[in-house]
Image: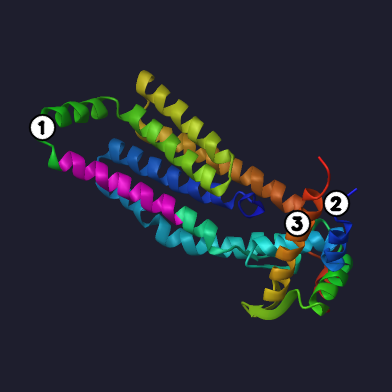
Amino acid sequence: MSYHQDGVLDIFVGVYVLLFGLGISLMTVTEFSTWFVIPAIFPAIMVPIWISAKKRITMPRIGYVKFGSRGANKLMAVFLGLMVAGLGTFMAFSFSSSQAWALTLRNLIISNGMIVIGISSTCISGLFAYTMGLNRLYAYGILTLVLFLAGHFIAIPFGYLLLAIGLVMIINGFVLLTQFIRKYPLPQGDETNVEKSL
Amino acid sequence: MSKNPSNLKNIDRLIHEPTRLMIMTQLYVVESADFLFLQHQLQMTPGNLSSHLSKLEKAGYVEIVKEFIEQKPHTALKLTKKGSSAFKEYQRNLKQVFNDLPK
C-alpha cells in the first residue's frame, strides 16, 4: 500500500496524539480545562490539510487509484464495530452500576487504568494494522503497550506518555516522508507527454 | 503432455503477454487507476506502458478516460466489461490447461 507509505498519516495522527498529550499535561499543570479544546478541534482543521497534503505530495508522485468499495467497507465495519463495542461497554456499566460485580470491575479498571488503556490501544492499532495492511501500526501498538505498562509501574503521567508516542509517530512520519519523496520523484515533462498522447 | 492440448488455443494471446497480463491484473483489482500509478506499480517506462495500453484499448479491454481533476488533465484507466470478462475467461482457460496436466 504505497498510499500510506508517505508518512503523512503518521505525522497527522502523531500531531493529534501530541496535542492530546499537551492538552492533558497543561490541564494538569495549570488546572485550566480549556486546553482540551486543542485536540477537540484538531480534526476539523487538519482533515482538509491532510487531504490537500495527499493531493500535493502523494498523488503527483505515485498516481491516483480508486479502489473498489470492499476495502472501504472493511474499514467502516471496523469503525462501527469499535463504536458499538465502546457504547456497549458504557451502557453495560451504566445499567449495572449498582451491582457488586460492576463496582468491583470499575474499581479494577480505574486502579489499572494505564494497563487497560495500553491493552485497548494495542488491540485497536492491531485491528487497523490488519485491516489496512500497515505493519508499522503493530509497532505503534506495541510501543503504546510498553509505555503504558511502564507508566503504570513507574508512575509516569498520562499526558507525558501521549507526548512520547506522538513524538515517535511524527519523527517516523517525517523519515517515511523523506524516503517517499526520494523514492518517487515528481514525473518529468516527457513522461507526462507520453501519457497525454494516449 | 496435456490431455487436451487444444485448451491452449483458447488462451487469449493479447492478455497472455506478460506486460499486458500485469496491466490487466492491476486494473482487475481496482476500480480505476491512472497512468502514473500503473507505471510505478509495474516498473515500466512511459513509452512501453503507453504502447501496451493502446493495444488493450484497441481490443476494447481497457477504457481510457480523459478528465480534469482540479483543473489539471488526468488520464484514468479502467477495465471495460469486455476486458473484465475476457480476463475471467483467460483465468478459467489457463486453470484448465494446468488442471489437464498429468500429476
**Is residue B73 located in the magenta-colored stretch of the structure?**
no
Q: Residues within 10 Å of mark 1 (few under 14, many from 20)?
A: few
Return the residue at label 1. A99
On the same chain, marks 2 and 1? The answer is no
In three-dimensional space, the C-alpha distance between marks 2 and 1, rounded to whole angstroms, equals 73 Å
Q: How is the image coloured?
A: rainbow
Looking at the image, residue A19 sits to the left or right of residue B72; the answer is left
Q: Which residues are magenta?
A: A76-94
Return the residue at label 3. B41
**Is residue A85 located in the magenta-colored stretch of the structure?**
yes
Looking at the image, residue A35 sits to the left or right of residue B21; the answer is left
Q: Quadrant of the C terminus of chain A?
A: bottom right
Q: Label 2: state its secondary structure.
A: loop
Where residue A14 appears, as percent x and y from the top left, is 50, 45
Q: Residues within 10 Å of mark 2 (few under 14, many from 20)?
A: few
Residue farthest left in this picture: A98
Q: What kind of residue is marked 2?
A: Lys
Q: Which mark is residue A21?
A: none
Where residue B26 appears, as percent x and y from the top left, is 72, 60
Q: Residues within 10 Å of mark 3 (few under 14, many from 20)?
A: some
The front one of A50 and A77 is A77
In three-dimensional space, the C-alpha distance between marks 1 and 3, rounded to whole angstroms, equals 58 Å
A159 to A23, vertically: above or below:
above
Chain letter for mark 3: B
Residue farthest right in this picture: B1
